[in-house]
């Protein structure tokens, strides 16, 4: 766990501090009493900036070149404030991200907060350079808005209102969060797939930099599925990763962007499809992952087990494979090795047919109230098999 996060930036009636920013499917930011995260990266970090840490250079007329902040977990951080600009009507500053022991691409990135007095009463919160804009429905913010989610928006709002109250300021304020390198960094995130263009996202939660969690990845899958559903899709294509995406493109002539990447979280993705109201979901993936579904493994990461050869051997034994060959099959290191042996034994087609049937049974058991299907392939043998409804689902997805 990294104890410091990133990016603190100056304020008007507040000391705006920005901590930890995006990097891969989920990172975090905090802006003066505000917690935020970049919704598109695997690493997550957040810092809670309590109102007591606020500094108010614009209203107080003073300049603060360092700040001390207390995180929700009791960690006190000392952060240098950089690139300070102070005028009677505007304050801007930045904090350089320190990702500690959590490696990410935003290390040493500057995140800015700028606050200006306005003639219009009220507080306006917006994104500047490097903060993305929402271009597709289904996200936390409406189309056209800066990708600053409701939690950090509320925290910024409350912090600014509190400091204004301390100084008796009743005028308007314009708060802008920016990340000069954000547009470049966002290209390495899921933002383009999620319909966020021009920069990173600012989300919100707790207050400490932590390595990417599984839940963060699951949440990203949910966002993308929700977008597809709210965009009117009744059927969805799922793929565990790059192998599946490549096969969809090269063998099926389908734009891989059509598929939602599930990583190892196939069970979670199927349940989300059901909860979001999809009528059907088709999974296309390498046999090395999808064979595990026949054994009820809904998270296919190897740390949860490796039943590939056990399942293939069980299917082969049911088709008449002898004991000696079964022992050899169990010793195979890869699914392609196993398929080669099954060809030699004359059981290739029969075992794949049985395997597809078993996967079909398990997928219907998992999500009986939506249509489900799967298509399996391997790098060496190409197309292998499919469940009974796969072809119909693929047709509906192409029509959807």
Image (cartoon, grey):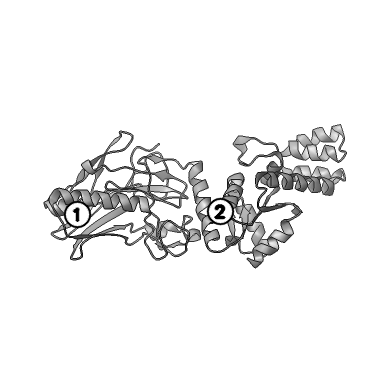
**Mark 1 in CB contact with mark 2 (< 8 angstroms):** no
Q: Quadrant of residue 388?
A: bottom right
Q: Quadrant of the N terminus?
A: top left
Give the residue at mark 2: 276
Residue at image point 46% right, 43% down: 212
Give the residue at mark 1: 12
Residue at image point 47% right, 55% down: 189
Residue 54 located left or right of residue 386: left
Label 2: state its secondary structure. Answer: loop
Foreground residue among 80 and 203: 203
Q: Taking 77 as reference, is 108 above or below it?
A: below
- As drawn, which residue projects farthest toward the bottom? 399
- Inter-mark Cα distance, 1 to 2: 42 Å
Q: Quadrant of the C terminus?
A: bottom right
Q: Alpha-carbon neighbours of circle 1 within 10 Å: few (<14), some, or many (≥20)?
A: many
User: Can see residue 50?
Assistant: yes
């Amino acid at each position: 766990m990294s104890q410091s996060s990133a990016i603190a930036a100056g304020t008007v009636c507040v000391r705006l501090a920005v901590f930890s920013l995006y990097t891969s499917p989920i990172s975090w930011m905090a802006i003066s009493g505000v917690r935020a995260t970049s919704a598109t990266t695997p690493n997550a970090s957040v810092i809670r900036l309590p109102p007591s840490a606020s500094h108010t250079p614009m209203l107080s007329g003073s300049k603060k070149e360092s700040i001390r902040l207390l995180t929700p977990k009791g960690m006190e951080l000392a952060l240098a404030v950089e690139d300070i600009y102070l005028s009677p009507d505007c304050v801007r500053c930045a904090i350089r991200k320190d990702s500690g022991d959590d490696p990410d691409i935003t290390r040493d990135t500057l995140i800015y907060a700028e606050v200006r007095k306005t003639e219009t009463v009220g507080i306006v919160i917006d994104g500047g350079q490097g903060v993305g804009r929402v271009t597709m429905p289904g996200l936390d913010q409406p189309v056209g808005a800066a990708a600053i989610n409701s939690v950090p928006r509320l925290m910024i709002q409350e912090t600014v209102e509190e400091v204004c109250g301390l100084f008796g300021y009743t005028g308007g304020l314009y708060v802008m969060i920016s990340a000069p390198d954000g547009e470049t960094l966002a290209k390495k995130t899921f933002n383009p797939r999620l319909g966020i263009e021009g920069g990173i996202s600012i989300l919100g939660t707790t207050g400490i930099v932590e390595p990417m969690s599984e839940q963060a990845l699951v949440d990203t899958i949910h966002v993308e599925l929700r977008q597809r559903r709210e965009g009117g899709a009744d059927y969805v294509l799922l793929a565990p990763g790059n192998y599946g995406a490549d096969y969809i493109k090269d063998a099926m002539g389908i734009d891989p962007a059509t598929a939602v990447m599930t990583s190892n979280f196939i069970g979670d993705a199927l349940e989300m499809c059901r909860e979001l109201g999809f009528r059907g979901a088709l999974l296309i993936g390498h046999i090395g992952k999808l064979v595990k579904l026949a054994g009820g493994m809904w998270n296919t990461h190897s740390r949860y087990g490796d039943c590939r050869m056990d399942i293939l051997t069980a299917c082969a034994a049911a088709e008449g494979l002898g004991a000696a060959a079964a022992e050899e099959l169990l010793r195979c290191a890869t699914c392609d090795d196993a398929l080669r042996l099954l060809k030699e034994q004359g059981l290739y087609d029969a075992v794949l047919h049985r395997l597809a049937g078993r996967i079909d049974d398990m997928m219907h058991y998992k999500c009986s109230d939506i249509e489900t299907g799967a298509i399996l392939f391997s790098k060496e043998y190409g197309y292998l098999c499919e469940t009974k409804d796969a072809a119909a689902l693929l047709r509906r997805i192409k029509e959807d």
